[in-house]
Amino acid sequence: MQLCGINIPMMGNRLKDIMKREKISAYRISKDLELDKGHLSKVLNEKANYSLDKLTVIADYLGYDIEFVKRKPSKKGR
């Protein structure tokens, strides 16, 4: 499935790559953004998806646009 040019099923792998690059854990993302850590784990392992709105929040937190292209400093180091 694609929304706005984003391949939703492949988002888990892309998120994992970015998390590794940014040196941030799934635990930190789930805690800071108040996301269910079990569901985030399923998304990262491509067994579930998030809505476009939730992906936008995660992308913004990591400092990326919704297509996960680096655009600004992340909010993870607040």
Image (cartoon, rainbow, N blue to C red):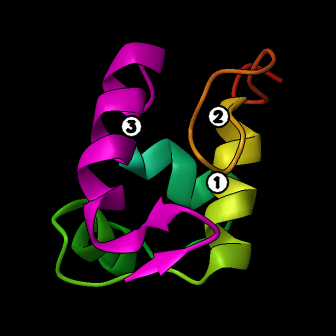
Q: Is the N terminus in the top left, top right, bottom left or bottom right quadrant?
A: bottom left
Q: Is residue 33 above or below residue 16?
A: below
Location of residue 34 (image quadrant): bottom right
Q: Residues within 10 Å of mark 1 (few under 14, many from 20)?
A: many
- The amino acid at mark 1 is Ile
Q: Which percent across, then down, holds residue 7?
A: 39, 65
Is 1 on the left-hand or right-hand side of 30? left
Instruction: Give SS at disc 3.
Output: loop
Instruction: Give SS at disc 1.
Output: helix
- The amino acid at mark 2 is Leu
Q: Which percent across, then down, holds residue 40?
A: 38, 69
Q: Which residue is mark 1?
A: 58
Name the front one of labels 3 and 1: 1
Q: Which residue is mark 2?
A: 62
Q: Is residue 10 magenta?
A: yes
3D distance between C-alphas at marks 3 and 1: 12 Å
3D distance between C-alphas at marks 1 and 2: 6 Å
Residue drawn at x 29%, y 41% is 16
Location of residue 4 (image quadrant): bottom right
Name the front one of labels 2 and 3: 2
Q: Residues within 10 Å of mark 3 (few under 14, many from 20)?
A: few
Give the number of the disc on residue 15. none
- The amino acid at mark 3 is Ser
Magenta residues span: 1-25
Give the number of the disc on residue 25. 3
Q: Is residue 20 magenta?
A: yes
Q: Earlier in the sequence, mark 3 or mark 1?
A: 3
3D distance between C-alphas at marks 2 and 3: 11 Å
> CB of mark 1 within 8 Å of CB of mark 2?
yes
Residue drawn at x 72%, y 60% is 56
